[in-house]
Amino acid sequence: DTGVSQDPRHKITKRGQNVTFRCDPISEHNRLYWYRQTLGQGPEFLTYFQNEAQLEKSRLLSDRFSAERPKGSFSTLEIQRTEQGDSAMYLCASSTNMNILHFGPGTRLTVT
Amino acid sequence: DAKTTQPPSMDCAEGRAANLPCNHSTISGNEYVYWYRQIHSQGPQYIIHGLKNNETNEMASLIITEDRKSSTLILPHATLRDTAVYYCIVRGTSARQLTFGSGTQLTVLP
């Protein structure tokens, strides 16, 4: 059973650089979610895809953030002109229905 | 979605039952109660969910009060590997996403 995978697991970047993260959901899951989690807090919702359509975006998703899911399979999350406040764990989850989300291990971003 | 209140931390002795409370006094009729947990440096993991009736699976039991204003997650025989942050989430059927609070840090002591 292959779960949700995320790449890379860790990323260190300098302020102002662009970064891109990848998420591969469980293969039959048509729904995909991105969350962000900072130290000591619960995950915060960023955006949601059903197949290739991005159906919901949080106000946390500023214009420096963009997410895609071009063929309804894997997804990418890009952050442009990174800031130190972007340092966080970025979590991807997938589901077949709205009940049970399966989360990946996350990508830990550190902006120096 | 209704707001939930959980204690920030709890301890439990290994082998004993861990009872994690959650208050959701503003829950509405079509909202489910979900529990997830997050072991350090991992993504959250689904445990169990329910609407009105008590539920049990291989991981835990969920007890929901008759008025649905609170619930308790029970880990019947806690092990050291159950040390994690436990999140209680209330979610309506039309909601597209889960809204996490701060959860309860459960520490299972040897």
Image (cartoon, rainbow, N blue to C red):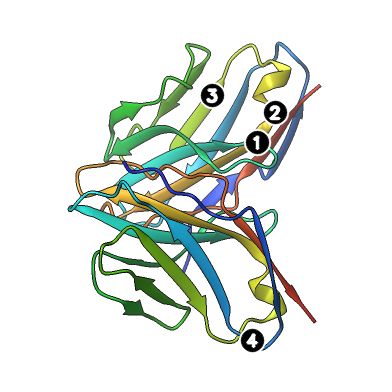
Please tell me which residue is depicted at 64% across the width and 73% down the height of the picture: B82
Tell me residue A57's x, y (percent).
36, 25
Secondary structure found at label 1 = loop
Closer to the camera in the image, B21 or B97: B21
Secondary structure found at label 3 = strand
Marks 2 and 4, how far apart at CA = 38 Å
Q: Chain of mark 4?
A: B
Which residue in the structure is indicated by mark 3? A78
Secondary structure found at label 2 = loop
Q: Earlier in the sequence, mark 1 or mark 3?
A: 1
Q: Chain of mark 2?
A: A
Which residue in the structure is indicated by mark 4? B16
Please tell me which residue is depicted at 39% across the width and 45% down the height of the picture: B98
The answer as to whether the residues below labels 4 and 1 share one chain is: no
Q: What type is the residue that disc 1 sits on?
A: Thr
Marks 4 and 1, how far apart at CA = 32 Å
The answer as to whether the residues below labels 3 and 4 share one chain is: no
Q: Would you identify the image quadrant in which residue A27 lies?
A: bottom left
B13 displayed left or right of A69: right
Tell me residue B61's x, y (percent).
42, 78
Q: Earlier in the sequence, mark 2 or mark 3?
A: 3
Tell me residue B107's x, y (percent).
71, 68
Which residue in the structure is indicated by mark 2? A87
Which residue in the structure is indicated by mark 1? A38
Secondary structure found at label 4 = loop
Q: Earlier in the sequence, mark 1 or mark 2?
A: 1
The answer to whether residue B49 is visible is: yes
Marks 1 and 2, how far apart at CA = 8 Å
Closer to the camera in the image, B76 or A22: B76
Mark 4, Cα crowd under 10 Å, few <14 / some 14-19 / many 20+, is: some
